[in-house]
């Protein structure tokens, strides 16, 4: 007899163009402000430090993005039906808050250190992925332990226009790149439990 032990995965899809195109436009407009030397209000996070990517809140496209992410959560739940109900059950079947998404501007040699997010699910959308030198630079990497406690890595080679959604507690990092002078741009956010919304 065979017994499968439950595990939690990540889900990837291509972002719909009606969401991606205006989101790209906002990201590129802010990039132009950054490169012109004008002031930009950066978001401070627990991983903000020298030589790390900088973060700016999504403003104009926030509502459209939140709407897309709410449907993305449904597709994640279809793929991994045992994960989200466990949160809703233990927390009185609360609804979700889609938070304040942010844009990541990562210059050459910058990185994002290994970290986790708050919430139930987190996501990343790749807006621009500069050319990299080899198979390791610029990668997005998950770290986790398997069912018998061994350390495992899962590496994703970012693709423009793709989104990943994954459990917020899943550790991940972003490696630096060196070949291109362009910013690597992505958009990230969290799906949180909302104690004001009971379903």
Image (cartoon, rainbow, N blue to C red):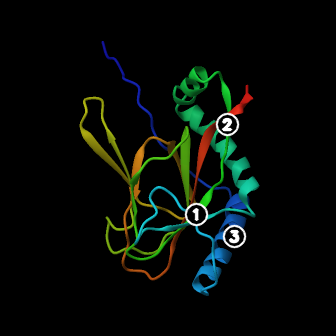
> Residue 4, position in %: x, y?
36, 22
Residue 98 falls left or right of residue 5: right
User: Disc number at residue 26?
Assistant: 3
Disc 2 vs disc 1: which is toward the camera?
A: 1
Q: Helix, strand, or loop for circle 1?
A: loop
Q: Nearer the viewer, residue 42 or 143?
A: 42
**Which residue: 49% across, 70% down?**
129
Hey, which quadrant is residue 185 in on the image?
Answer: bottom right
**Which residue: 41% across, 30% down?**
7
Marks 3 and 2, the one that precedes in the sequence: 3
What is the total number of numbered labels drawn onto the structure image?
3
> Residue 81, position in %: x, y?
55, 28
User: Disc number at residue 170?
Assistant: none
Tell me how far mark 1 sits from mark 3, CA to CA: 16 Å
**Image height of 32 relative to 197, above or below:** below
**Which residue: 37% across, 75% down?**
109
**Which residue: 42% across, 66% down?**
49
Q: Helix, strand, or loop for circle 3?
A: helix
User: Disc number at residue 96?
Assistant: 2
> Residue 3, position in %: x, y?
34, 17
Disc 3 vs disc 2: which is toward the camera?
A: 2
Q: Helix, strand, or loop for circle 2?
A: strand
Hey, which quadrant is residue 114 in on the image?
Answer: bottom left
Residue holding disc 1: 43
Residue that extends furthest to the top in the rendered view of this protein: 1
Using a 10 Å C-alpha cutoff, classify the residue at mark 2 as few (fewer than 14 neighbours), some (14 to 19) or many (20 or more). many
Tell me how far mark 3 sits from mark 2, CA to CA: 25 Å
Q: Are marks 1 and 3 in contact (CB under 8 Å)?
A: no
């Amino acid at each position: 007899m065979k017994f499968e032990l439950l595990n939690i995965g990540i889900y990837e899809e291509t972002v719909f163009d009606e969401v991606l195109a205006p989101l790209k436009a906002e990201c590129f407009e802010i990039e132009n402000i950054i490169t012109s030397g004008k002031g930009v209000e950066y978001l401070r996070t627990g991983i903000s430090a020298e030589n790390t990517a900088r973060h700016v809140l999504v403003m104009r496209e926030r509502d459209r993005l939140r709407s897309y992410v709410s449907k993305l959560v449904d597709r994640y739940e279809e793929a991994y039906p045992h994960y989200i109900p466990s949160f809703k059950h233990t927390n009185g079947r609360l609804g979700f808050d889609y938070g304040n998404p942010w844009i990541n501007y990562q210059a050459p040699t910058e990185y994002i250190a290994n970290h986790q997010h708050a919430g139930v699910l987190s996501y990343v959308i790749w807006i621009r992925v500069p050319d990299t030198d080899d198979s390791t630079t610029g990668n997005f990497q998950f770290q986790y332990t398997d069912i018998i406690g061994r350390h495992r890595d899962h590496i994703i080679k970012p693709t423009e226009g793709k989104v990943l959604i994954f459990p917020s507690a899943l550790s991940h990092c972003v490696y630096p790149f060196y070949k291109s002078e362009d910013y690597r741009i992505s958009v990230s956010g969290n799906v949180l439990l909302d104690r004001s919304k009971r379903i």
